[in-house]
Image (cartoon, coloured by chain):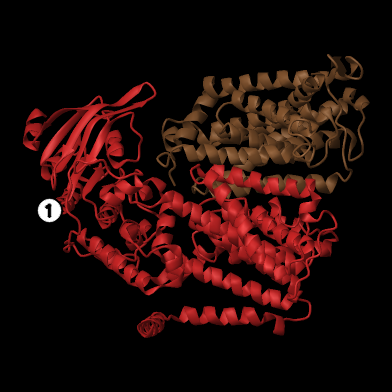
Chain colours: A brown, B red
Amino acid sequence: MSLWVQIVLTGLAAGSVYGLIGIGHTLVHRLTGIVQFALGDLVGLGVFLTLLVTAGRGPVTQATAASGRFVLGLVVALVVTTGIGAASYLVVVHPYLVRGSTMGWVAGTVAVAFAIQAFLGALFGRPAYVFPDPIPFHDVGSGGIVTVGGASFQVRSLFVIALGLVLAWAVTKTISSTRFGGGLRAVSEDVTGAHVVGVPVDRYVALAFGLVGAVAVVIAVAAAPSGPFTTQTGTLLGLKGLVVALLVRFSTPWAAFAAGLGLGVVEAAISSGTVFGHGLGGPAYREVLPFAAVLVLLAVRERARRPDVETELG
Amino acid sequence: MNAALVQTRAALGEAGRAARAGWRPVYTVAALVVVLALLLPWYAPGWVEIDTLAGWVYLALAAEGLWLAAGLAGMPSLGQGAFMSIGAFTTALLTAHAGWPAEATVPIGVLTALATGLVIGAAVIRLPRLYIAVSTWILTWLVVLLASEFPGISGGAQGYVVPSSLDPTAHYVLAVTLTILLVVAGIALQRSSVGVRLRALRDFPAAAVRLGAPREKLLLGAFTASAAVGGLAGSLSVQLAGVSDPNEFGPFTAFKLLVAVLIGGAAFAGAGPVGVLAVGGIALVVRGWAAAGGGSSAQLEPLLAAILLLLVLGLGSDGLLPALARFRDRHRARKPAFPATGAPFIRRRRPAELSAHGLRKRFGGLEALAGLDLRVERGECIAIVGANGSGKTTALRALSGVMELDGGEILLNGRPPPAPAPLAWVDAGIVCTLQGTAVFRSLTALENVMVGAGLHRRFGGPFRTLAATPKSRTESRQVRTRSLEALRFVGLGGAAKTPVELLDSHEQRLLMLASALAAEPRVLLLDEPSAGATAGDAMRLGDVVRAIKHLGVSLVVVEHNVRLVSSIADRVVVMAEGRAVADGPPEELALAH
């Protein structure tokens, strides 16, 4: 029993981060009709820019969290990722979007991802880094860990889940109730029409990309302090967020967040090795099985559906 | 037996004559380049590393494979890295564990990649393009994770030793030969019926499906073939390297190959090798520059090269090959004069009657069709008129089988049309055009018409096309002739080789009619053929529509232009709120207005 409680708690903690990134992916896609392949790398960039400003390229301890440089680091990270988000639209997405070249903007955002990876890889050579927690969760329980019914969990994972709910709500509101979101919905449905009724299309879409860059830093602050962070962690998180978003077909932030939590629990269950027996369990299967399952599920679901070529122009 | 030999000899002789007749100077240049490329190891200066070069040529092979999916079929796949890895791991596993000779593992590597391609293809072909990119990206990472979590598959950090009996020079020659064969096959495929329809699907899926292009079969075929070539390149690459490396072909390879196809010019066969040449060449320059500066890394150079090229391409180019083609065509006359009058077009199929009974369709809260009854007799032309939102276009979509209905029945000559809709419906003679100028932008006028004319081919599959079997070639000639007839019929006979983007909108409307006509319709459904046309153009369009009617084709036309309607229609159906509210000859309609 307590094993299952532990699996669910561990899973929800990890899954909430996947869910956050899934929300980010649905946000970009719902607003612009585009997939930002560099989202996970922007999260990584947010983490490492903060560290860079706080303590250079060296190691950081929890005590640094209280320092002014850390706050400055967060601000710098927020500004830079927002800028890179918006710039990636203007430089590598927009030129291809106007020509209807999906291949072009896909390659463009993937190029941004690899550029960020190369930058981080060149600057940060240690195997893993610690990101100090801006909120002192480690003062609660024993070092931030609470035990319930024989299962233990990090208090901060409750915060991450709460943040996910708030973000899902905020994103839903942004899409449905603001002038900005309404304008962008018009853009994602009919670019020419949006132009005609006076929506400043390029500025709005660039803003949306910038917004997602900012969201990446929020996700970074939520996710990074939970454990050691490597220069590749962001990439992998971004990928899991993409798996989650694909599973729910980029439909709503709520669905993406729920799917993220689900993915986390499934991973934890596979990882514990007790669910599928020892033949198909254990940490090695943690990512591989869900990824394969999502692809197969997609195949099965799409075979059953009638294709819709009507909405797909050019 | 003897007769077969004689027949084969005759066919070969004919092929030889055709090749001589079709020979152009550019082929001589191409042949020279090929020979020079093949002989490179024997005259290259000492600093050229043949094994590195061979590795790049295998990448070019994989890129040209990717072109089949990404360029020809317009599926932006980020999965080519995965397919190369799958080919490489299969070869490494079989040689290391089962003791197979490396060469014998190649077919298994290809088959494994092909099987994976089939599964992923099945998942993605029905999805919009960006989902294709997302799913294949996840696949590429899945293979990376598999290799890193299960060292048994890839040989881990040590790698498996893969002994090859070929030396680097032999690998180089093999790689160049395979790449050239694939490019030649790509060029042949691109011009064939299959290729024309794939390109039509890439340009405008909804219009291509209405002309009977079997979307799923063609896309799945292109994707799977692309995966198989990736597997081939991966399997041979690992033999060239001599040892397997789990990180050799990952997401970065997938990215690099996609950029290569994009740089080369996605619409052109040969984009893959040209793009790889560009990325590789600039990476070399970057290396020289970095070496002068003191720092360098194996991945950074191609990354910089790729980003640089993407930025340049973003400034407004379509890629290297299209730029070259424009340079070649710069002196060509833009547009030949067309004959004003139509030429005869002989109907091949008997006209049919089409009827709809109680059609119902809801979109959310909106009832678009509320029990529509409709009937067009053999050889009759009916026009559907009505206010915006009265369900006219929905009615046409229902009649053409592209939309699932909530209720009601459609009968062709009193029987339900064959399944599956819409593909078999088009084949049975229900052909539909889209509103406005729904043409395929990257095709010539003749190729546009061939999309429709290819519908009834029996020997036009990719394998028969590539093998150029006598039946396939005879049929190709017939399709061209028939397409030309259709072009002349609408008065565009002189524009056969003109790229569609050079035609004006009136000519594009006529072209759309010619494409539909070439599909040999028994019932033709036209959605606002005159939308956006000037009054004069609309009347000229009316002449062509009347001529089509005189061929004996039954017509259902949705149209706003009252003058056009009264000049073509035998009967007018007025729609309101999803059903037919009035029905009568056009004179009565004119009175009602």
Relative horizontal placement of residue B131, taking residue B306 as reference (left or right): left
- Tell me: residue B212, above or below residue B384: below
Q: Position of residue A27 (x, y in %)?
A: 60, 30
Q: Check the image and name the residue furthest to the front.
A: B1
Q: Nearer the viewer, residue B72 or B566?
A: B72
Q: Position of residue B308 (x, y in %)?
A: 66, 56
Q: Nearer the viewer, residue B559 or B537?
A: B559
Q: Secondary structure at mark 1?
A: helix
The residue that appears at 48% across and 52% down in the rendered structure is B219
Q: Quarter holding the C terminus of chain B? A: top left
Q: Position of residue B561 (x, y in %)?
A: 19, 39
Q: Position of residue B591 (x, y in %)?
A: 7, 31
The residue that appears at 81% across and 47% down in the rendered structure is A121
Q: Nearer the viewer, residue B186 or A190?
A: B186
- Let me know if residue B357 appears in the view: yes
**Disc 1 marks which residue?**
B550
Chain ID, mark 1: B
Relative horizontal placement of residue B325, taking residue B351 as reference (left or right): right
Q: Nearer the viewer, residue A241 or B488?
A: A241
The residue that appears at 63% across and 73% down in the rendered structure is B176
Image quadrant in which you'd find residue B452? bottom left
- Tell me: residue B335, above or below residue A34: below
Q: Amino acid at mark 1?
A: His
Decide: few, some or many residues near mark 1? Use Cα within 10 Å; few <14, some 14-19, many ≥20. Answer: some
- Let me know if residue A208 appears in the view: no
Relative horizontal placement of residue B495, taking residue B11 as reference (left or right): left
